[in-house]
Image: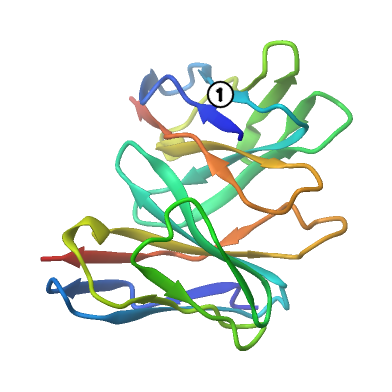
Amino acid sequence: NAGVTQTPKFQVLKTGQSMTLQCAQDMNHEYMSWYRQDPGMGLRLIHYSVGAGITDQGEVPNGYNVSRSTTEDFPLRLLSAAPSQTSVYFCASSYWGGQGAETQYFGPGTRLLVL
Amino acid sequence: AQSVTQLDSQVPVFEEAPVELRCNYSSSVSVYLFWYVQYPNQGLQLLLKYLSGSTLVKGINGFEAEFNKSQTSFHLRKPSVHISDTAEYFCAVSLTGGGNKLTFGTGTQLKVEL
């Protein structure tokens, strides 16, 4: 199992550009989520999904869109990048419901710089 | 809503010394509690978790944590640290039976020195 994979590892954008951060998992997890990590603020939840076709907002959703067309993939879209979105982005996945559902597995992260 | 406080942003310690990283949480309902570790330029790895039962939880790499409901704390301890324990440590909570959303603390940077 590759676990949770994220691409790209690094990205530099100019203000106003758009991009998609990719996240994939091969553990057949129903639950997937995106967090951003900023210095001194820990990780904050952006969006999450409990299954294909079902998504919802987290704590800091503004400026980000998500969709979930398959169980494996959960891309995060920045439609018009802003310097405030400079951060490290982590994708995570877990089972949904039942024993073991509470444990989330994190990807290696995508480091994004918006100029 | 729940919240997590990690009062110590940095903890320096000498190798082979004991260490305690503090975590306090606030929630009006029952929570699960977690400690994650992040090595430089890597993702988060689960160290240990408290779901229910025994309040002393043992995790990987010799770490353990104790859940104290009356003090709403979940402090992380290791009796003897190694250079390789240098990393950032995050305490997190999620609601029991309320979904998988994690609320993280701001993190504690553990720096182990020779």
The amino acid type of the residue labelled 1 equals Cys
The residue depicted at 43 percent of the width and 34 percent of the height is B107
Residue that extends furthest to the bottom in the rendered view of this protein: A69
Q: Residue at x 38, y 19 (%)?
A: B14
Q: Is residue B12 above or below residue B86?
A: above
The answer to whether residue A33 shows anywhere in this view is no
Q: In which quarter of the image is residue A60?
A: bottom left
List the residue tagged with mark 1. Answer: B23
Q: Height in image: B62 above or below B40?
A: above
Q: Is residue A81 visible from the viewing direction of this image?
A: yes
Callout 1 crowding tier (Cα within 10 Å): few <14, some 14–19, many ≥20: many
B3 or B43: nearer the eye? B3
Name the residue nearer the viewer: B43 or B18: B43
Q: Is residue B88 left or right of residue A92?
A: left
Q: Where is residue A42 in the image (x, y as percent from the top left)?
A: 41, 41
When asked about the image quadrant of residue A104, the answer is: bottom right
Which x, y percent locates residue B74? 65, 24
Please identify the quadrant where the C terminus of chain A is shown. bottom left
Q: Quadrant of the N terminus of chain A?
A: bottom right
Rendered location of residue B61, percent (x, y): 61, 39
Count of labels shown? 1
Q: What residue is drawn where x is 22% and y is 71%? A: A81
- The chain containing the residue under callout 1 comes to B
Q: Which residue is drawn at 39% across and 19% down?
A: B13
Q: What element carries label 1?
A: loop
